[in-house]
Amino acid sequence: MRKDSFRERLIFGINITSLADISITLMIIFLIAGITATLSHTGLDIRLPSASYVKEITKEGVTITIKKSGEIYIEETPVTERNFPTVLENFLSRKETMNCFLKAEPEVPYGKIIAILGKIREVGVKEVSLIATYKRE
């Protein structure tokens, strides 16, 4: 009889305080990670061409920017066409990736874009993504 009365006095329950703490902490971590991922692809302020189909970037890579004035940037570092391959190799080795993202203003001549794409391929980059903004119809 004594065992039964002991069991009746036990109250079972789940302490949700620690569960709530963990949930809030994870939510904050994911918010910070999401904001950081978004900011990592912003870079220089240029006007991008628009496209009717745009896929969101989900991987790491080196961003190359060509302005209408002809200036070339790797991430936010200005480079010349002559030293472009060397600087690109340095950036790729630091990021440990072989992906590049190419951003160019609409006024940049097509020949300039093709020349830079050729130099990117010479370095050994297999995948180059062209960056554009989504055009709503």
Image (spheres, helix red, strand yellow):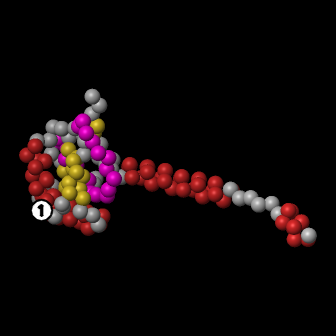
| Residue 104 locus on image (x, y percent) | 20, 44
For the N terminus, give its image quadrant: bottom right
Principal SS element in the magenta part? loop
Q: Secondary structure at mark 1?
A: helix
* Residue, far left: 111
* Residue, far right: 1
Q: Is residue 51 visible?
A: yes
Q: Return the residue nearer the eye: 101 or 16.
A: 16
User: From which residue to which does the magenta span run?
Assistant: 50-69
Residue shown at 59% from the left, 53% from the top: 24
* Residue, far top: 137
Whether 51 is among the magenta residues is yes
Q: Is residue 35 above or below residue 135?
A: below
Q: Return the residue nearer the eye: 129 or 120.
A: 129
For the C terminus, give its image quadrant: top left
Residue shown at 24% from the left, 36% from the top: 52
Indicate left or right for 80 with 77 as reference. left
Under mark 1, the amino acid is Glu
| Residue 28 locus on image (x, y percent) | 53, 53
Q: Which residue is mark 1?
A: 122
Q: Quadrant of residue 132?
A: top left
How many residues crowd around disc 1 within 10 Å: few (fewer than 14), some, or many (20 or more)?
few
